[in-house]
Amino acid sequence: MTLYEKIKTIYPQLTDNDFFTVITLQNDSDGRGDYIAKWEHPTLAKPTEEQLA
Amino acid sequence: MASIDASTSGAGGIITTADNTGTLNLQSGGTTIATINSTGLSMASGKVLAPTGPAFSAYAGSAQNTTSNVYTKVQFPNEEFDTNSNFDSSTNYRFTPTVAGYYQLNVSVSVNGSPARFAIQLYKNGSAYKIMTDISCGTGTVPNAISGSAVVYFNGSTDYVEVYANQVSATGFYSNSTTVFTWFNGSLIRGA
């Protein structure tokens, strides 16, 4: 499951637009994979490492 | 003002003659190639003032798979030219000019598949800096490529830029082995 899919499982109400505006998932093409670079959602808290594990 | 002629023959290398025209002519072989007067510097017809600041052009050369909704650094492992060796095409895919000034940057990213949304951002020093394109794609309006440009200041030492793109519902960025698809280039347009 990708990071995006994990987050969508935790917060199914998130839209694709959220990932272009208040949330930025990022991949630096360095082999380290996807990570949360920005989380500025007005009501939903950034998922914890435990939630994403 | 004096007229200065640089001669490659004869005893005098430089001959200075006051003619009171208010114009300074730069000549080669007895022909004026540039003129400086009260309005500034102008080149003679057919002559160009050729800047020698850094310029680069890089391209992907192959497809890059990405995950939907993830801003992913676009890889440019191939170079058309890199006049000052300021583009890293092997590890970080970033432009770090060693001459301070203002640079015109241009980028185009092609998509592999049919995206529902497709965007390019320019990152400066590791952070989002400028959205270049962000397009929502309805049925029948799927783009093949999106592009953008910006003028960016660089300090000539630590400043660098990278290209990130994000797609939804496609498979990633497209390129074949040519320079045509998914490219990034730029050059110095003004000194600091």
Image (cartoon, rainbow, N blue to C red):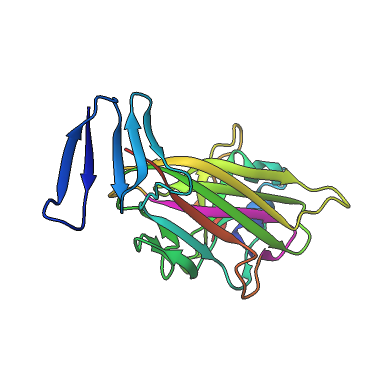
Drawn side of residue B11 relative to residue B184, left or right: left
Quadrant of the image occupied by residue B3: top left
Residue toward you, A31 or A39: A31
Quadrant into which the C terminus of chain A falls: bottom right
Residue B67: percent from the left, percent from the top?
A: 64, 62
**Is B101 placed above or below B60 here?**
above
Number of disc labels: 0
Drawn side of residue B16 relative to residue A3, left or right: left
Drawn side of residue B92 relative to residue A25, left or right: left
Residue found at x 59% / y 38%:
A22
- Residue B153 seen in the figure: yes
Residue found at x 39% / y 47%:
B125
Drawn side of residue B116 relative to residue B26, left or right: right
**Is B102 placed above or below B109 here?**
above
Residue toward you, B44 or B142: B44
Residue found at x 35% / y 44%:
B32
Residue found at x 66% / y 64%:
B172
Residue B107: percent from the left, percent from the top?
A: 57, 53
- Residue A15 seen in the figure: no
Residue B151: percent from the left, percent from the top?
A: 48, 40
Residue B13: percent from the left, percent from the top?
A: 14, 51
Magenta span covers which residues?
B160-173
**Is B110 placed above or below B154 here?**
below
Is B81 inside the magenta-drawn segment?
no
